[in-house]
Image: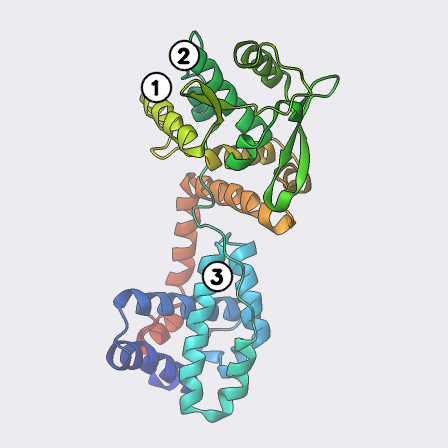
């Protein structure tokens, strides 16, 4: 059976069994990643051509097949951009090695180098509060006290508007407009101004807050909406002040709702509002406008995170075990391919 080990598989063997571990002193983790990437690529190409592995040659490791494989990883298997890019790097690494031994492969290696990496987002997606965690957090302030009224309204408004912390601290009384369609006007990065609608409950909180903190103020007043009193004088509230009370409320809320994370910070409210809007069915374009993103690409992280959540949930379903067993059954009948893998270090 050693005849089935053609030139390509001999190089795969040398790359995985000699070059990476002995010449490059690569870690076992790196070698395992490369082995996985090459295995998956060969399986994908063989399945597409409906041939066995021993019929594949270097000609099959072309740009078109590799791009098709990468698309398959992200579109069919739901793998993250980071995993996709790691597979690409492994294949390029092998082709670079092969080109040093067979110069005629240099052009093919260069064509693979032209395949772009995919923009990576946070892996775990993004951090955000679940609806239950948000409710628990917003319920923590003691609204029988003046400070509790302020803190609760600050959190409610920050969540409802999806505002950044500095946008919140810049708010003036006149930035809140009542009427048939209540709104808040926010000044974001680069002095860009956007107007967002306010929910009825938020307006109820606003009225109560104003009756306590600005009882005589006119709605067109340019006074700071949020302030602290130091030595008898009103001063703008700082982000340190906000972070302090968030930490206190998060600690007590976590005792009642385990979904509340250990680190609750202002930007978490913005992420949470955006994710909740997206999950409720709001189009990403509208979410992008709501958040004041200059580019829609900045908002795609929410779609990516939601997709990753769904994929993780699917993998936990009972059907995943069935699918894995089906894959194993199929592999067991491909004895010749298995032997080839063992001979060239792919197993």
Q: Residues within 10 Å of mark 2 (few under 14, many from 20)?
A: few
Instruction: Examine the rendered structure and indicate whether residue 127 appears above or below residue 330.
Output: above
Q: CA distance from mark 2 to mark 3?
A: 49 Å
The C terminus, quarter of image: bottom left
| Residue occupied by mark 3 | 84
State which tag comes first along the sequence, 1 or 2. Answer: 2
Q: Residues within 10 Å of mark 1 (few under 14, many from 20)?
A: few
Q: CA distance from mark 3 to mark 1?
A: 40 Å
| Residue occupied by mark 1 | 256
Residue 317 pos. (x, y %): 43, 38
User: SS at mark 3?
Assistant: helix
| Residue occupied by mark 2 | 142
Closest to the observer: 146 or 153? 146
Residue depicted at x 45% and y 80%: 95
Mark toward the viewer: 1 or 2: 2
Residue depicted at x 53% and y 82%: 110
Q: Is residue 6 visible?
A: no
Residue 297 pos. (x, y %): 61, 51
Residue 78 pos. (x, y %): 51, 52
Closest to the observer: 321 or 163? 163
- Find residue 21 and report its image quarter: bottom left
């Amino acid at each position: 059976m050693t005849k089935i080990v053609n030139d390509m598989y001999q190089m795969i063997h040398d790359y995985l069994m000699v070059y990476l571990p002995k010449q490059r002193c690569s870690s076992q983790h790196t070698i395992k990643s490369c082995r996985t990437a090459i295995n998956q690529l060969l399986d994908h190409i063989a399945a597409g051509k409906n041939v066995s592995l021993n019929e594949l040659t270097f000609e099959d490791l072309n740009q078109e097949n590799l791009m098709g494989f990468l698309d398959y990883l992200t579109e069919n298997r739901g793998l993250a951009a980071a995993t996709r890019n790691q597979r690409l790097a492994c294949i390029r690494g092998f082709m670079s090695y092969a080109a040093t031994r067979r110069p005629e492969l240099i052009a093919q290696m260069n064509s693979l180098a032209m395949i772009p990496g995919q923009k990576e987002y946070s892996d775990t997606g993004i951090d955000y509060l679940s609806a239950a965690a948000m409710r628990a957090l917003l319920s923590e302030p003691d609204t029988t006290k003046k400070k509790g009224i302020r803190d609760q309204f600050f959190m409610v408004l920050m969540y409802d508007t999806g505002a950044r912390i500095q946008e919140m601290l810049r708010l003036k009384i006149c930035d809140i407009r009542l009427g048939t369609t209540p709104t808040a006007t926010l000044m974001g990065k680069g002095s860009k101004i956007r107007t967002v609608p306010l929910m009825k409950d938020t307006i109820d909180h606003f009225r109560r807050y104003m009756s306590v903190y600005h009882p005589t103020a006119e709605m067109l007043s340019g006074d700071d909406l949020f302030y602290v009193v130091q030595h008898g004088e009103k001063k703008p509230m700082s982000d340190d002040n906000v972070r302090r009370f968030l930490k206190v409320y998060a600690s007590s809320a976590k005792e009642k709702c385990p979904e509340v994370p250990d680190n609750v910070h202002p930007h978490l409210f913005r992420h949470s509002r955006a994710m909740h809007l997206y999950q409720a069915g709001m189009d990403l374009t509208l979410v992008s406008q709501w958040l004041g993103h200059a580019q829609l690409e900045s908002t795609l992280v929410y779609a990516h995170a939601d997709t990753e959540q769904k994929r993780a949930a699917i993998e936990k379903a009972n059907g995943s075990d069935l699918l894995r067993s089906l894959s194993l059954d199929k592999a067991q009948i491909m004895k010749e391919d298995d032997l080839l893998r063992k001979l060239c270090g792919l197993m």
